[in-house]
Image: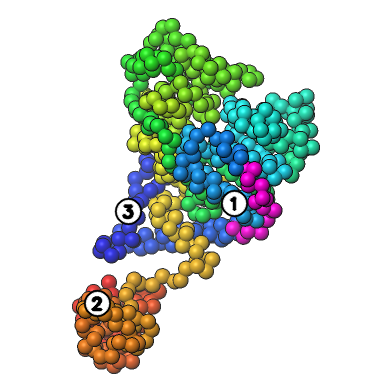
């Protein structure tokens, strides 16, 4: 491929690493047919996208009052840390979305774990409450909801200068329970200004009172049905979504321009990258990891894929390191036992927290700087990344062990573990999501299917075709024409050529002889022209040059050159080279 046509190359990325790529023959027609099928699908998808654009543009709500921004600034001043540059950019962008636009906000904030997404959400939540509207913070698990509730209560609650009424609604607080009825009554009357909770907030009949903002934390943990409920709740309401690793469809929607996206990549000061170790599981590796952390008076997370493996893992750890105080947390514990176990461990009690993925989100314990993940091949890439983010919340060097069995790894599992070994830099959450996009495929952009069509031509080319289809349907793109440099006829247009003496020669003013053109620094082949020796008639030559420049496809160009051959004879080699 010539260097000047390198833009035609794109990296092939498919949804299934285990399937060998089927190559098309250069002289065959299969590649063109595959591209045509994908192009047809992107046009259909582009129509759906534009319908979504149009529907979003018709939604309006009263913007938040800019006169209250000084009050928001008083809350911002209570943040005990110096915001990072990317955080400041997010603050400003979200203020513009909420205060200066009539269209409801729909923004994804993608930032690494511990990079300050929660502060971005808190400022948006307070802006909403200060404007007299109700706000909701939605979390995927009870553990994370409880942590958010404590944090929000400390920053905005009745004991703070801002005196915001905050309620928590999680599983077990049904509409028929005493607590559930009381909280629903507070929501209905508007007494509860800010509500923190789990998917219980999406249940039918939650009587919101002038809901203004919905913040969805760790959106990748919500299922398709829950997200459909979110759409119902947030119709015409501002939505702010937080995620370290957005699922492939969410990332694809962001890359396609359907959702506004902000990225926080600048790490907090003194934060160190977590050292990731991918190894076959042995007792020696686990013992070394435990010894290193316990020797510096730290604590350890030990994660297993399934609840039924908890008892076996307890015996395994006690055999390796007798005398360990092991705290257990998983989703099948009764009531609030899992939250209480995590709280007990957070206070510095226990050596090891043995858990399932219940600790994947929201567990922030600076004293824990080692995590050991058993059977890491059984977890998805997003989950592995989130688990790694549970450590490294202090200025100490943190370690994440991704341990796997000696045999039985699938190609996809190998690709996921390789990604965790490679993507160790701070702020690599968006890169992990992009790698997940490669491994799993983009899926149906607007539907629930997670398997993609993009594998026919590769994800990069698919996204370029989709963007082009969207732009064409919006009337933003002119038809494709062959790349060429056009030299306008003398005394026409606003052509500007610089001569050898540095003097600007203008096509309408200074160029008045063929000598001036010859002296100008216009190199051979800098523009397309047909030689006078091949087409003697000036008018015909100018017409045919114009037809060649405006040819919309290679096929049209081939037909045009065939006509030249019939009329003028074989083409000179210089002309052939210009047409390539």
Q: Residue at x 46, y 16 (%)?
A: 352
Q: The residue tagged with tag 1: helix, strand or loop?
A: helix
> Dot 3 corresponds to which residue?
23
User: Disc 3 versus disc 2: distance between alpha carbons?
Assistant: 52 Å
Question: Can the viewer see residue 567 in this picture?
Answer: no
Quick check: 531 left or right of 347?
left
Our reading of the magenta stretch's main secondary structure is: helix
Q: Give the number of callouts.
A: 3
The label number, if any, that marks residue 502 in the structure image: 2
User: Disc 1 versus disc 3: distance between alpha carbons?
Assistant: 46 Å
Quick check: 35 left or right of 521?
right
> Dot 1 corresponds to which residue?
97
Q: Position of residue 92 (x, y in %)?
A: 54, 48
**Quadrant (top left/top right/bottom left/bottom right) for the N terminus:** bottom left
Q: Earlier in the sequence, mark 1 or mark 2?
A: 1
Measured along the vertical axis of the image, is residue 43 above or below residue 336? below
Tag 3–tag 2 contact (CB < 8 Å): no
In the image, the segment drawn in magenta is 53-72
Q: Residue at x 70, y 53 (%)?
A: 62
- Asked if the magenta segment contains residue 177, the reply would be no
Q: The residue tagged with tag 3: helix, strand or loop?
A: loop
Q: The residue tagged with tag 2: helix, strand or loop?
A: loop
Mark 1 vs mark 3, foreground winner is 1
Quick check: 337 left or right of 389?
right
**Quadrant (top left/top right/bottom left/bottom right) for the C terminus:** bottom left
Q: Position of residue 217 (x, y in %)?
A: 57, 37
Q: Earlier in the sequence, mark 3 or mark 2?
A: 3
Mark 3 vs mark 2, foreground winner is 2
Mark 1 vs mark 2, foreground winner is 2
Q: Residue at x 50, y 47 (%)?
A: 89
Q: Earlier in the sequence, mark 1 or mark 3?
A: 3
């Amino acid at each position: 491929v010539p260097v000047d046509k390198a833009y035609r190359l794109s990296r092939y990325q498919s949804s299934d690493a285990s399937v060998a790529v089927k190559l098309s023959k250069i002289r065959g027609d299969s590649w063109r047919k595959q591209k045509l099928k994908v192009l047809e699908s992107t046009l259909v998808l582009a129509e759906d996208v534009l319908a979504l654009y149009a529907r979003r543009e018709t939604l309006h709500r009263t913007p938040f009052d800019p006169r209250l921004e000084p009050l928001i600034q008083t809350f911002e001043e209570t943040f005990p840390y110096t915001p990072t540059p990317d955080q400041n950019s997010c603050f400003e962008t979200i203020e513009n979305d909420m205060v200066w636009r009539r269209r409801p906000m729909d923004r994804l904030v993608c930032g690494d774990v511990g990079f300050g997404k929660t502060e971005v959400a808190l400022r948006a939540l307070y802006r909403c409450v200060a404007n007299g509207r109700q706000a909701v913070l939605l979390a995927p698990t009870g553990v994370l909801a409880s942590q958010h509730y404590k944090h929000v209560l400390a920053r905005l609650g009745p004991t703070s200068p801002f005196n915001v009424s905050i309620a928590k609604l999680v599983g077990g607080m049904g509409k028929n329970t005493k607590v559930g009825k009381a909280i629903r009554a507070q929501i209905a009357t508007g007494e509860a200004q800010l509500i923190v909770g789990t998917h219980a907030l999406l249940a039918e009949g939650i009587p919101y009172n002038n809901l203004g903002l919905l913040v969805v934390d760790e959106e990748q943990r919500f299922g398709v049905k829950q997200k459909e409920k979110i759409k119902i709740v947030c119709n015409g309401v501002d939505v702010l979504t937080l995620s370290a690793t957005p699922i492939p469809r969410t990332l694809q929607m962001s890359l396609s321009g359907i959702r506004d996206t902000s990225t926080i990549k600048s790490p907090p000061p003194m934060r160190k990258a977590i050292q990731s170790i991918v190894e076959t599981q042995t007792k020696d590796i686990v013992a070394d990891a435990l010894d290193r952390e316990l020797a510096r008076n730290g604590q350890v997370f030990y994660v297993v894929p399934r609840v039924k493996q908890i008892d076996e893992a307890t015996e395994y750890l006690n055999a390796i390191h007798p005398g360990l105080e092991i705290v257990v947390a998983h989703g099948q514990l009764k009531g609030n036992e899992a939250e209480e176990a995590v709280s007990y461990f957070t206070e510095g009690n226990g050596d090891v927290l043995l858990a399932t993925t219940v600790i994947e989100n929201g567990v922030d314990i600076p004293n824990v700087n080692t995590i050991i993940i058993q059977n890491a091949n059984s977890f998805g890439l997003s989950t592995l990344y989130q688990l790694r983010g549970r450590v490294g919340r202090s200025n100490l060097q943190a370690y994440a062990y991704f341990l796997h069995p000696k045999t039985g790894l699938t190609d996809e599992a190998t690709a996921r573990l390789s990604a965790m070994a490679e993507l160790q830099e701070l702020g690599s959450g968006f890169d992990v999501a992009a790698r997940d996009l490669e491994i799993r495929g983009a899926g149906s952009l607007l539907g629930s299917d997670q398997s993609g069509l993009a594998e026919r031509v590769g994800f990069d080319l698919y996204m370029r075709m989709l963007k082009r289809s969207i732009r064409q349907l919006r009337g933003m793109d002119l038809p494709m024409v062959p790349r060429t440099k056009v030299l306008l006829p003398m005394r026409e247009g606003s052509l500007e050529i610089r001569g050898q003496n540095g003097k600007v020669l203008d096509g309408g003013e200074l160029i008045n002889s063929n000598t001036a053109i010859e002296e100008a620094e216009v190199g051979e082949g800098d523009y397309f022209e047909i030689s006078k020796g091949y087409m003697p008639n000036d008018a015909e030559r100018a017409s045919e040059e114009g037809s060649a420049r405006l040819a919309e496809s290679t096929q049209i160009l081939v037909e045009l050159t065939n006509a030249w051959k019939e009329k003028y004879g074989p083409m000179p080699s210089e002309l052939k080279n210009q047409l390539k």
